[in-house]
Amino acid sequence: MNTKEFLSRYQAGQRDFTNLNLMAANLKNMNLRGINLSGANLTKANLTRTNLSHSNLTNATLSGANLTETNFINANLTNANLSETNLSHAHLQGAILPSESGPTASEV
């Protein structure tokens, strides 16, 4: 599924995008509140200022993604791969973050 089709389905009300491949997708400034991207591949995606509050990103791969100013409020990032991501000014209040690798809310 390409980015255009993904956004069209989201706007039509679909919220479950488990295991979707959005590698290098440009999702800057999108409102994706409440989406299920568990297991999704978002490697090197641009999610700058994207609203992912109340979303499920369990086991998602976000390595190399730009997450500057991304809204992760109350999002579930359990076991997500956040290696080499830019989390500058990301909003992480209430987010469930990866336990072993990756930053904690106090480190961002």
Image (spheres, helix red, strand yellow):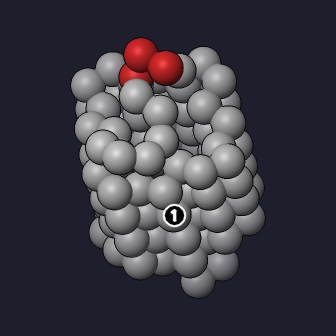
Residue 23 at what x, y percent from top left? Answer: 67, 70
> In the figure, residue 1 lies in which quadrant?
bottom right
User: Residue at 41% across / 16% down in the picture?
Assistant: 106
Closer to us: 28 or 95: 95
Residue 98 at what x, y percent from top left? Answer: 35, 46
Q: Which residue of the protein is positioned furthest toward the bottom in this rendering? A: 1
Residue 14 at what x, y percent from top left? Answer: 34, 67
Left or right: residue 42 compared with residue 31: right
Task: Confirm whether residue 97 shows in the render.
Answer: yes
Residue 95 at what x, y percent from top left? Answer: 30, 32
Amino acid carrying mark 1 in the image: Thr
Total marks in image: 1
User: Residue at 40% across / 28% down in the picture?
Assistant: 104
Label 1 element class: loop
Q: Which residue of the protein is positioned furthest toward the front in this rendering? A: 100
Closer to us: 48 or 100: 100
Q: In this picture, is 67 found above or below 106?
A: below
- Number of residues whose C-alpha sits closer than 10 Å to that of mark 1, classed few (under 14), some (14–19) or many (20 or more): many
Closer to us: 45 or 26: 45
Q: Which residue does the numbered mark 1 point to in the structure image?
A: 61
